[in-house]
Image (cartoon, helix red, strand yellow):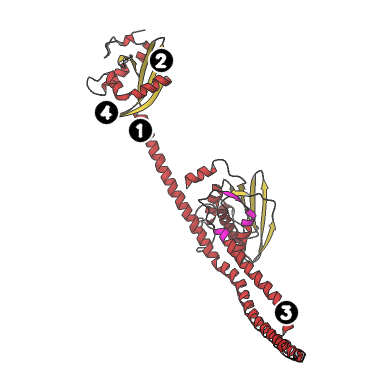
Amino acid sequence: MSEQPDTPTTAGHRDTDMPWALAAVDTAVVLIDGEGRATRANHAARVLAARLGPGATPDLLLSRTTTGASWEMAQRDGRWVGEVSMADPPMVLEVKLYCGSDGSTTRRFATFSDVSARSAREDELQRRHDELQRTYRRLAGAQEQLLQSEKMASIGQLAAGVAHEINNPIGYVHSNLGTLQEYTGALMALIEGYASALASDDPASSREVIRHMRERLDFDFITGDLPQLLSESREGIERVTKIVQDLKDFSRVGRDEAMRPSDLERGLESTLNIVWNDLKYKVRVEKHYGTLPLVECHASEINQVLMNLLINAGQAITERGTISLATGCEDDEAWISIADSGCGIAEDALQKIFDPFFTTKPIGRGTGLGLAICYSIVAKHHGRIEVSSRVGAGTTFRVVLPVVQPAGAGDDEATAG
């Protein structure tokens, strides 16, 4: 085996003074004395030092890449590793300092690796990662805007129906109040008649007058109709209150809040109540509810999914049909099924129904975003939407959600937001 070239090092030693293995490796290695000076340097170290400028030595390499603090940490821990960026010449060095003792003698050496290419790749990867993060946040913002736009479009579509649902009870409550006003006037007149009779010297003589007044005012009819009017009015106000509450539950913005345990059946009933005006003239609803636990979710977003599915189910029925609602829980997952007896979906279209802007509805009746947004919302909740359909027989959508969100899901959501 041939020896290494007998070339003196800057410190006055030859490469042959170093262990042969260190002299042969490509990594720059410098042995250091107790004063912090280079005592030996292999060929790779001398070549690296020469890049610092004409006449540059391993001692200059040490002084430009190490500090007292780095040596203190190496002395304490046995080693220190760091990266040092240089401007002249431009390069990044990975520096490793090692300290040990042999009896009373301290042994120290340093290794140097040019990691400029690796550092540049890491910087480029970091830049691309930051750019992807910014793009993801922009896409998440655009998705949220689409969600809210689609939600507002859906609410706008239902506004007339909701107004009708509110106007009906308000209408008969208003009519009942007019009748009650008339009844109140008649009863007040009768009370005044009684008061006048009681104030007279001979109340018994006014008995016939009071009887005629009761007949004229139709007192017996009033006393029979009054409780019914009050009951109908109370029922109408409760109906309006329920619709308003359902609208609040449906549209409550909760995206920035943490997912919380929610009653999916209550959400389904509220949403059904909101869309009922669009369904009631041609749809019979069957309910087959199982036992559902509270499910961790954003309730308003799940309501948006249910509303889209209910509207689609109603639109799939042209004349008269049935929508079957079912709920259940299996293996820590809750599910809601919405099945219609409508026209069904062709096999080739079934593969595309969740694609953005794909729609089987006539122009002007659908944006093609409803099911795409439903899919996105359910995916964000770590759930899934299952669909089965047969042309002429109807379609069934099944929304499946985990009862408890996976660990770390809240962190992912916060990052996405």
Spatial separation of the CA atoms under disc 3 and disc 2: 106 Å
Question: Magenta part of the protein: which range?
Answer: 248-267
Which residue matches tag 1?
120
Instruction: Assign a secondary structure to mark 3.
Output: helix
Q: Is residue 258 magenta?
A: yes
Residue 63 figure quarter: top left
Which residue matches tag 4?
89
Residue located at (44% from left, 47% from top): 137
Instruction: Assign a secondary structure to mark 1.
Output: helix
Spatial separation of the CA atoms under disc 4 and disc 1: 15 Å
Badge 3 vs badge 2, beta-carbon distance below 8 Å: no
From the viewer's perspective, is residue 249 above or below residue 402?
below
Q: Which mark is residue 100?
A: 2
Instruction: Assign a secondary structure to mark 4.
Output: loop
Give whichever of 327, 183 is nearer the camera.
Answer: 183
From the viewer's perspective, is residue 149 above or below residue 35?
below
Q: Earlier in the sequence, mark 3 or mark 2?
A: 2
